[in-house]
Amino acid sequence: MALTTTPTVLRRYIAFELRRLRESVVLAGGTVGLSQADAAKRLDNSKARIAHFESGRNLPKLTDVEILLPFYGAADLVEGFKELIVQARTTTPVFEPDESMTLPPGFDLYLGLEQGASRILTYDAMASIGLLQCESYAEALLRGHDTTLSDDELRRRLDLRIRRQDVLDRAESPLELVAVVDEAVLRRQIGGPLVLGRQLDHLLTAAQRPNVSIRVLPYTAGVHPALHGPFTIMEFPIARDPGVVYVEDRIGGRYRDNVEDIDEYAAVAGRLLELALPEPDSASMIGSIREELKR
């Protein structure tokens, strides 16, 4: 059965699961894990080919998984994997960035994952997440981040950022977005008072969507486990997929798909939700800060 997701999500899951299954094989004597060389030998191919499968660079052939998965002790997953491979090969991306646009390293992957996610939980410590930015706020951020951008490049990046928000209005299974927003984000005058006011209005409107939850983390929460900075947890509509954590700095983005790392960030997110204001109180705080800007 086809999933409402993107080829990027499918390729990432296939790669992740092939690596995980290989590394979890229990051998004689209690040793855990086959090497890529072991898998390559079974496939009568090169170790590089296995590495390409597990990095997502190449999709395996259907016959490859018919051989590898039983070798990994997962013969029951063969048919499901074959369906995912076919879907990954035949599904058209929701949209693709303009090839002339320069994106931060790793962000092209992020776009494909974001558009195919079923749920995103984000902690916004410095600015609102791109999915919740109004156009003037997004423009101020882009201009401030890189003052060398040409007007044409700025327009392309701005169009991409706004177009990404269509995922919230998917006809089938719209994205569920949970945003924990630090109070500092609501007060930082990116673009000045007028632009910030528009952004706060935008957040209040977005919060009325049934698939969007905005929770404010007030200053009074004090010390919390996300003082290291913002992060995004993405979940996907594949039953065995643990999801992925995305963190970003000025140079580019990094992904963590180790289950232990994902669990760690999920625990942090759970604590933030405990400390954050309920949705009605969050909306009230956003509205109050909005009124302050009018004085």
Image: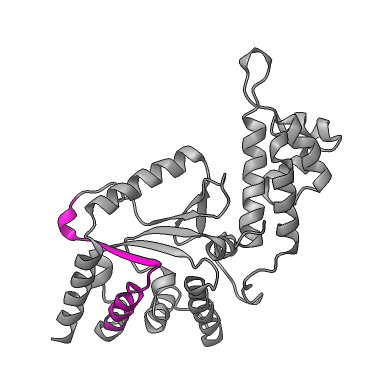
Residue occupying the far front of the picture: 1
Q: Identify which residue, 211 or 266, lies in the foreground.
A: 211
Residue 52 vertical placement versus 197 (above, below): above
Colour scheme shown: one colour
Picture coordinates of residue 89, whole percent (x, y): 75, 60
User: For residue 73, which quarter of the picture?
Assistant: top right
- Specify whether residue 75 is in view: yes
Rendered position, 229 above or below 196: above
Q: Residue 43: image x %, image y %?
A: 83, 35
* Image x and y of residue 116, in percent: 57, 62
Q: Is residue 80 above or below residue 211?
A: above
Question: Could you tell whether 201 is left or right of 52 in the image?
Answer: left
Question: Is residue 48 in view from this perspective?
Answer: no
Q: Residue at x 29, y 81 (%)?
A: 201
Residue occupying the point 39% across, 41% down: 264
Residue range in magenta is: 197-222
Q: Which residue is at 73% across, 36% downward?
A: 69
